Amino acid sequence: MLAIFNLAVPVLLVALIVSGLAATMHKSKKLSFATNNAIFLLLLALGIYYSVYGSSFNVLSLYHIYPFSSFTLVLFPLALLLVNIAAYYVEDSYIKFGIMLPIISVGVLSVGLASSLLTILVAIELMTIPTIILIALNGKQYAEPAAKLFLMAAISVAVFAFSIALAFPYDSSLSLVRAASGSTGTLYFLILSMVLLVASLGTEAALFPFDLWIPDVYQGSPNSISPMLAGINKKVAFIAIIEITFIVFIGQKASLTLIFGALAILTMFFGNLGAMVQTNVKRMLAYSSISQAGYIMVGLAAVSAFGLQAALFQIFAHSFMIIGAFIIAGFLAMEGFMSISDYSGLYKRSRFLAFSLTVIMLSMAGIPGLIGFVGKFLLFSSAISSGLIALAFIGIINSFISIYYYARLISNIYSSRDHKSMHVPREIYFTVLLVVAIVVFFGLYPAPLMALASAASSSIFSII
Amino acid sequence: MLTLLIILPLLAASFLVLLTYGREKYTGPLVLAGSLITSLMILYASMSSFGKIQELNWFGISGYTIHITTQLLPLNVILSLLIGLITPLIMFYSMGYMEYKTERPRFFFEMGIFASSMLLFAIAGNFITMFIAWEMLGITSYLLIGFWYKRENAPYAARKSISTIIIGDFAMLAAMLIIWSSYHTFSFASILASPSSLYLSIAMFMVLIACFTKSAQFPFHEWLSDAMEGPTPVSAFLHSSTMVKAGVFLVLVLFPLFMKAGLSELILAIGIISAVLGASNAISSHHVKKILAYSTIEDLGLMFVAIGLHAIVAAVLFFIVQAFYKALLFMSAGSIMRANNEEEDIYKLYGSAKRKLLYIPTVIGVLSIAGIFPLSGFFGKAAIDTAAASNAYAYIILVIIDFATSAYIFRWLFIHSRKPSKSAAVDYSKIPKSMVYAGVIASILVVLAAFAFFDMGSVQSYSDYSLSISISVIDSIIETAAVAFGLVVSYLLFMKAKPTGEIRTKAYYILFNSVAINAAYLYISKAVMYFAEGISVIDELIYGFFASGGEGLLAISDKLRKIVTGDSNNYLIAFVAGIILIILLLLV
C-alpha cells in the first residue's frame, strides 16, 4: 500500500501529460481546465503531506523526494494553479494553454524532484520549449519575444550541457548526489563548469548580464504567459541553480560566494536602476523581478543553511507577488491600460484591484507586515550572519532605491480622477485575492513557511 | 484552547462589516453577533485556560524566537471579562446611536478593530504582543476620535490624542529595546522573575511614561477631554474598558517591577496630581461629556494612587467598578444630548428627569460614581481611602476629592434634569430604543459590580507582595460624610440657585485650569518648533543630499535603459562577456 502511495507523484505527472494530450482530442476547454486544476490541487496536497511528514525516498531511480523537493511540490502546483485560473479568463482560446500547460508543469515539477543532472536538463527543456510555442501561437506580433526566448534558451541549454560534460569526469556520474559532489581544492575544470552552469541557468533566472532579454520578453509576451515566465520559469531556474551548486559544487564555497555576491550586486543595481525610468508597467515589473532575483542571490551568496532558507523563502514570496502583479497588469493591459500614467485613478475604477496592487507593491518594496519584508529581512540577516556585511548593506540601499518606482505606481493609482468603475471577472478576482491572502498571511505569520524553507535548506546541506 | 482564538469572531465580524456598504441594516447586528460570540469564548477560555501561558512561535531568527504569547492570569481574565461584558453593550448602544448616520460600516469596522486590539492587549503575555495591541489601540482611537472628520474640531482632537500617545509609544519602544538587550526576553513572566538592575529601572520609567500617556495622567492628560469630539459610543468605550485602562492595566501586570525600580512614590504623586486636576476641571467644565472625561482622569488618578500605596487589590476593584459606571454615564450623556438636538453645553440641556427609563439608570450611575453605599463605586473608593489611612497627606487629599466628586457629579445630574425652558426644543421620545435599553442593562451591571468586592480574594498574581483588601468602618463614614457634604453643596449651588453658568470668577479659572495646561502645551510645542527650525539647516542638507542623489540615480537609470536595445546580438555578446568576466573575477 505504502509503496504504491510513493508512486503518487510520477502517476500524477503522467496524468498531467495524458490530460494535455487528451485536450488535443476533446477540445473542451472546461474539461481540460478542470482536470488541470484537479491535478495541481492533488500535487499540492501531496507536497504538503510530504513536507509535514518530512518524507525522504527515491522513486523509480528518477526522482528523489526529500524536504527540498517537497518544498517545490508546495510552491509550484500552487503557482501553476494561479496561472492556469488567470489564463482561463485572459486567453481567448484557452485550449492551446490546456494542451501546453500540463507539459510545462511536468518540466517545472521535475526540476525540483530530479535526482540526476540529465533529468534537470531535460526537465528545463520540457518547460521552456512549450512556453516558446505557447507564446508564438498567440499570433504574429508575438514572434519577436518567442524568437528571443528561443535564442536565449538554445544558448543556455548548450552551455548547460557543456557544463555537465565538464563536471562528469570527476565521478563519472550524472547523479546529483555523486557527480563531483563536494569536490574541494582548485579544480579548474570544475570551476569552469560551475561558471558555465551559473551563466546558463542565470539566463532564465534573470541574473545580470545574462538577463538583458528579460524586459523585452516579459513585456512582449501575451498577458497570460508573463505571470508564468516571471513567477514559475524564473523560479525553476533558481531551484536548479540551488540544487546543482549546493550539492555538486559545494566544495568550492569561496568561489560560490564570490560569483553569487558579484552577480547579486550587479543584478540588484541593474534591476532597480533600470526600473526607475520605465513607463510601461509590465516592463517595470520585469525590471523589478530582475532586482528581486538579485536579492535572492544575496541569500545564496551566504552559502549557509540560513542563507538558503532565506533564499527559498524569498523565492516562494516573490513567485506569488509577481504572479499577482502580472495578472493585474495583464488584465489591465487587456482593458487598454499599459503605462504608469494610464493607471492614474485606478482607485476609482476598481477599489479591489487598486488595493491588491498596493499590497503587492508594498510587499515587494519590503514594508513590514507583508511577506516581502520577511523575505528581505531573512536575506539580509543571513548575509550579515555569514560576514557579508557589505553585501547586505548594498542590498538595503537597493531596496531603498526600489521604493521610488513602487511608490510611484502606488501614488499614480490613488491620484484622483473620476472614472467609471470597471468589472473584474471572477477568475482575476479569485487569483488576486489568493495572492493577497498569501502575502498578508505569511507576512503576519511567517513561521510555517519559514519552517518549510528551513527543512528544505537543511536537507540540501545534509544530502551528501 | 488557543487563547488567541477568542479575538477571531470579533475581528472577522469587523472585516465582514466592510462588505455591508449599501446594505447597512446588517452592519450593527453583524458586529453585535461577533462581539457576543467573542464574549462567550472569553467566558469559556477564562475557565478552560485559566492561569495558562501559551506561546505561539511567530518567527525565529538566528537562535532567537519571537513569540506571540498570551496569558490568562487573574488580571487578564478580569480585563477580558470586562471587555466581554462591555463590548456587546456598547455595540448595542451604537446601533441606535448610528441610526440615520452615514458611514456606519466604517464606524463599526473601527469599533470592532478597537475592541479586538484591546482584547489582544488584555491577554498579551509578552512585550511584543502587548506592543502590537498598544499600537493598534493608538491608531484605532485616532481614527475613532476623528470619526467626524468634517467637523471643525474633530481632526484637531484626533491629532492631539495621537501626538500625545506617540510620546508614550516611543518611550515604550525604548523600554522594549532596553529590556531585550539586557534580558534577551520579552516575556512578562521571565522579566518578572529576573533580578533588579539599573537597566530595569530605566526601562520601567519609560514604561511608566507610556502608561501615563495612554491613561491620560498629568502632564499628558489633556487629550482625553478633547477626545470628546468623537461619537459618544466611542467615549463610552474609551473611558470604561478600553484604551485609558491600558496604562493602568500594564502597571498592574508589571507591578512588582515598578516596586523594584523604586517608582511607587512617583506613581502616587502623579496619581494625586491627576486626580486633583481632573476633579477641579470636572467641577468647572460646561461640556456635558468633558465633565465625565475629567472625571475619568480623576478615576485613573485614584487607581494610580492605590497602586502607589501598594493597595493592588483596591486598585483592581476600582478598575472594575469604574468601567461599568463610566460606560453607563456616557451612554446617558449621549441619550440626553440626542434628546436635546446634540447640544453639548450642559446649561442648555434640560429635562432628563422626564424619561424615567433613562433617568433611573442615570441616577444609579451618579450615585455609584459619587460613592454611596451600597453601590459599587462606594466599595472602590472606600477601599482606596482605607489603604491611604497610613499616609496623612494622601488621605486628606482623597477625602477632598471624594467631596469634589460628589459635588461635580450631582451638579452634572441636577443641571440637565431641570425642567425645559420655553425656548428649548426637547424631545425625549426620539431616543432610539437600543440606546435606552443599553443604559438599563449597564445600570444593572453597575449594581451587580458591587459583588466584585466580595470576590476579590482571587486576585493573586504576585508572590512577594501581601495582597489584601479591607474597608474600615471609620473610613467609610468619613467617605460618606464627604459625599453627603458634596451633595448638599451641589444641591444648594446648582438646584436651588437656578444657575446659568455665566459666573466667571477667579476661583473658576483656578478650577478650570485646562485652559492653562493647553496653553502650556502650545508653549512647549512652539519651543520645539523653534528648535526644529533651528536644526532644519541640517534637514535641508540631508534633503539636498537625497534629492541630488535621486537625480543622479535617475540619470544613471536613463543611461542603463539604453543598454537594453532590443537587439539580440547585444544580448548574446553580454552573455559571453558575462562568462568571461566571472572567470576573470575568479582568477584575480
Image (cartoon, grey):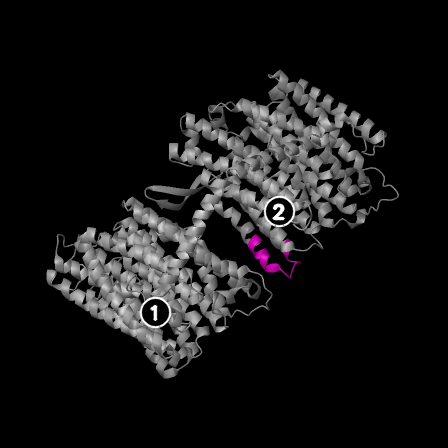
Q: Which secondary structure type mostly characterizes the magenta part of the structure?
A: helix
Secondary structure at numbered mark 2: helix
Q: Say the numbered circle drawn on residue B144.
A: 2
Quarter of image, res A419: bottom right
10 Å crowding of disc 1: few (<14), some (14-19), many (20+): few
Direction from residue A352 to residue A7 in the image, left or right: left
Between B400 and B48, the one lying in front of the other is B400
Q: Position of residue A293 (x, y in %)?
A: 33, 59
Q: Residue at x 58, y 59 (%)?
A: B19
Q: Chain of mark 2?
A: B
Please, what is the three-letter code of the amino acid marked with disc 1? Thr
Marks 2 and 1 on same chain: yes
Q: Which residues are magenta?
A: B14-28
Q: Tell me, yes or no, if residue A196 can be seen here.
A: yes
Q: Residue at x 37, y 42 (%)?
A: B65
Q: Which residue is mark 1?
A: B565
Q: Chain of mark 1?
A: B
Q: Position of residue B511 (x, y in %)?
A: 72, 27
Direction from residue B500 to residue B273 in the image, left or right: left
Please, what is the three-letter code of the amino acid marked with disc 2? Leu
Direction from residue B538 to residue B509 in the image, left or right: right
Between A71 and A182, the one lying in front of the other is A182
Secondary structure at numbered mark 1: loop
Kindly report the distance in space between the C-alpha atoms of the residues bearing marks 2 and 1.
54 Å
Total numbered badges shown on the rendered structure: 2
Q: Position of residue B583 (x, y in %)?
A: 19, 59
Query: Image height check: is B126 above or below A148?
Result: above
Q: Residue at x 32, y 43 (%)?
A: B62
10 Å crowding of disc 2: few (<14), some (14-19), many (20+): many
